Image: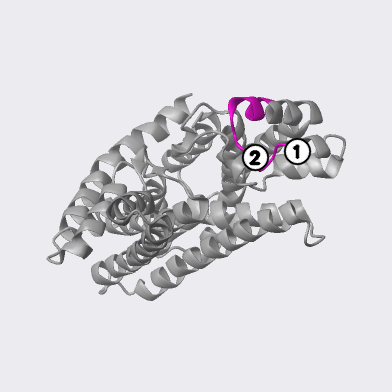
Amino acid sequence: MIYIDTFKDYYKKSLLKLNEKIQNFNNKIKEEENDLIKENIDLFANLNSDGKLIRGTLVNLGYKLLKEDLDYSYVLALAFEVFQTSILVHDDIIDNDILRRGKETIHAFNQKKYYDLTNNKNDAKKISESIAICMGDLGLYYANQIIATNYKNDPNLGNILIYFNDIVLKTIKGELIDVILPFIEKNNLENINLEENIMLIYKLKTAYYTIIGPLCLGMILANSKKEYIEDMTKFGYNLGIAFQIQDDILGIYGDDLVIGKNVGSDIEEFKQTILYSYVKENKEYFDELNKIYGKKADKENISKIRKIFDKSGAKEYALDKINFLYNEALDILDNIKWIDEENKAILKGLVLYLKSRKK
């Protein structure tokens, strides 16, 4: 437990400063004269508050592994959190989510507003999704602008922007597969290696976006050696995949409003996870699962799917994979010589903190 406390102490300190940076940024972008623009920037700024800020914290931690002047990395951490918000705006349209961070999503707010004004459901849906696409795009370019403006005199600016945009590209590619795969599977269109594609989603959408990207971005700001980046990529890959599989389990077995969404949303969206692919591969319970998967995620259906994942061995398989990956991440970390003991303790705490989370 001492390692978890070490990470929590670091996390707490990072949150204080990062929240201040985010609040200042939010206040600045809200200084908009045009009412049509201002209303939606206000929505973005509201959504850009009250996040867990784990990715921004990891940007700072990546920088801290090599340098101590942490004030210099907080702006980069801010940029990553703005990117995080912008990609969530797009994600909420795709998943048709009405809540994010306990707040109404941008497209949900506008859909309600314009339906009340016109009583036209189709027009309200179209304009609300169009606005949200614009706001997600705006957030992505805000993030780039933050980096370019604040690090314009840094000789590493080119490398920072190249790596940052590579994270964005990987995230979008992962999302693309995540969107297409359920449609293919639901309609039985192609014979593909399901788990291989699911693991690629986990790699692109979670491992790089949540763990590898933030840590290595901070390290690049600190002018890291290439071999150090390679070490952290191996560590972050295992940690990120474990993190996502854990999310998949929480998405079925967790309490209501886990990860800012209702439990069972993966079921309704026909989300492809290794829990699903395991049942499909082992066939015995697959017909039973397919009668419910993709249907309304009420208490009865969630209970039935939990039982299928339990008796088929899918949950046990996923938990075993999580434990292996977390342990692998710790083993990799133990073998990295260039990280000092203080920072290694924080990273071990990160592993154990993520492993122990319930939401």
Mark 2, residue position: 295
Relative image position of residue 9 (x, y in whole percent): 34, 32
Q: Residue at x 56, y 59 (%)?
A: 175
Amino acid type for the residue under numbered disc 1? Lys
Q: Residue at x 33, y 56 (%)?
A: 82
| Mark seen at residue 80 | none
Q: Which residue is mark 1?
A: 291
Specify the amino acid type for callout 2: Lys
Q: How far is mark 1 from mark 2, CA to CA?
A: 8 Å
Q: Position of residue 71 (x, y in %)?
A: 24, 53
- Residue 296 belongs to the span the image colors magenta: yes
Tell me, yes or no, whether the highlighted magenta stretch contains residue 57: no
In the structure shown, which secondary structural element does the residue marked by tag 1 occupy?
loop
- Is 178 drawn above or below residue 275 in the view shown? below
The reply to whether residue 69 is visible in this rendering is no
Q: Is residue 318 left or right of residue 156?
A: right
Query: What x and y, as percent, mark residue 310?
Result: 74, 26
Identify the magenta region. 292-303
